[in-house]
Image (tube, helix red, strand yellow):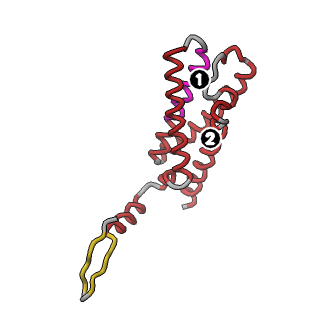
Amino acid sequence: MALKKRHDGGGVRLAAASAKKDRAAKRNRSPYSAMHTGPGRALTAVYGVFALSATARAGYQVIREFDVAPVAYSLSVIAAIIYIVATICLVIGNRISHRIAIGACVIEFVGVIVVGILSFTHPEDFAKPSVWSSFGSGYGFIPLILPLVGLWWLSLVGRRIRAS
């Protein structure tokens, strides 16, 4: 924070020059930008990590061994796209991106449930695991929990906005 010396009367008083700008920026920012504070920051970071890891995994699988398990690897690509969309929407933090993020979390949760069930009932289609196979067990079940946490956080932000 830059400090500015201000002379008034006989004494020298230090004032925070950027404090006034910070207050103005907080007043002018979108109420959806609450996604950038507290748990929203952590949620965005986790989605970012999953976007990178799912994209890397899907890219490798599709390039190197797509013919081994095309269904599972195609689902990995879909999961990567959903994680990327969710991450971008959480970072943008406006009304439209908020709604898209909710949709991405819902699609992600439904995908994890459906793929999780199918990976047990039709194991022949999942010769190799995808991100969502066995309810995300390869990722410590985070793919199962993450969309629920995302929906919880997005609903809190939405309620706070409606209340104001």
Of mark 1 and mark 2, the one earlier in the sequence is 1
Q: Foreground residue, 155 or 10?
A: 10
Tell me where the magenta segment starts and ends, as one range.
Answer: 69-84
**x and y percent of residue 84 in the render?**
49, 34
Crowd class of label 1 (few under 14; some 14 to 19; many from 20; radius 10 Å): some
* Residue 132 percent coordinates (x, y): 64, 29
Q: Secondary structure at mark 2?
A: helix
Camera-side residue of 128 and 26: 128
Which residue does the image show at 55% across and 14% down from the upper left? 66
Quadrant in the rendering for residue 126: top right
Image location of residue 109, percent across then percent down: 64, 35
**C-alpha distance separating marks 1 and 2:** 17 Å
Up/down of 117 relative to 37, above or below: above
Q: Which residue is mark 1?
A: 75
Identify the main secondary structure in magenta: helix
Would you name the residue on which mark 2 appears? Answer: 146
The foreground one among 163 and 149 is 149
Which quadrant is the N terminus positioned in?
bottom left
